[in-house]
Amino acid sequence: MDLRRRALLGVDGLRVLLMLFHTVTRIMAEQEVENLSGLSTNPEKDIFVVRENGTTCLMAEFAAKFIVPYDVWASNYVDLITEQADISLTRGAEVKGHCGHDESELQVFWVDRAYALKMLFLKESHNTSKGPEATWKLSKVQFVYDSSEKTHFKDAVSAGKSYECQAQQTISLASSDPQKTVTMILSAVHIQPFDIISDFVFSEEHKCPVDEREQLEETLPLILGLILGLVIVVTLVIYHIHHKMTANQVQIPRDRSQYKHMG
């Protein structure tokens, strides 16, 4: 009986050790992160890399700005008025993250953790006419801020709040108060949270419709100008050939009185 009890205790102890090992391994993996914002030529753009087991598993480049409404006392110290804080993600921010087979996460903290941005990515499989195809999406964005931080929140009445949005693509972070919507502005975005083949190298990019439309708007005037120039050249060539052919033909006098001089 004692031997069986000891055996059971031994199995339980092994399970605990395995759980502890898994936890420690995950924590160590989460710490393999780098902030490479100093390599960007755009001073407003940040570069974050998450690496596990010595291999890049998530890369993200973007410039982020948050417009946060907050309440302050009016001059009569009775009424409340709404001000706006413009908060930009600054270089040198602390970064954490982890990668999984179907789920990856990026966490960014700045100004002594007064501000935190968390982005969750999910990979999904779909059956298409060409066979199984994997796509990924930004499934959750969470922005946490502390309105007691005096750099951006001057004379704020209440403490900070947490806002999050479950939508796949959004820049509006809704709260329980519909009049206090936080606006998140992302630009110069380049993100790959899964399936990175080469270390520190993005795979082929899929351009967003806005970029494709802007590129078309930039190239369309050039294309139209080339077409117009080609039409003008062709028209001049045709006119020149026609003029040359008609000049070599015998001109018949229009005045009938001149016919007597002919023949």
Image: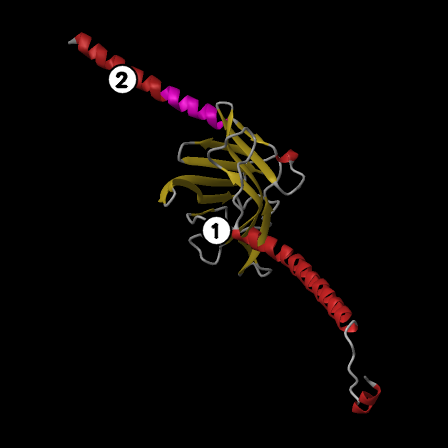
Whether 160 is among the magenta residues is no
Numbered disc 2: secondary structure: helix
Of labels 2 and 1, earlier in sequence is 2
Kind of residue at disc 2: Asp
Q: Residues within 10 Å of mark 1 (few under 14, many from 20)?
A: some
Q: Which residues are magenta?
A: 20-31
* Residue farthest left in this picture: 1
Q: Residue placed farthest to the top in the image?
A: 3
Q: Quadrant of the image for the N terminus?
A: top left
Residue 101: x %, y % from top left: 40, 32
Q: Quadrant of residue 235?
A: bottom right
Residue lying farthest bottom?
Answer: 257
Q: Is residue 164 left or right of residue 111?
A: left
Cβ atoms at labels 2 and 1 below 8 Å apart: no
Q: Nearer the viewer, residue 124 or 103?
A: 124
- Quadrant containing the C terminus is bottom right
Numbered badge on residue 170: 1
- Residue 155, numbered label: none
Question: Marks 2/1: CA distance?
Answer: 46 Å
Q: Nearer the viewer, residue 18 or 187?
A: 187
Disc 1 residue type (three-letter) = Thr
Quickly name the residue at label 2: 12
Residue 62: quadrant of the picture = top right
Q: Main secondary structure of the magenta part?
A: helix
Residue at figure coordinates x 56%, y 32% from the top left: 201
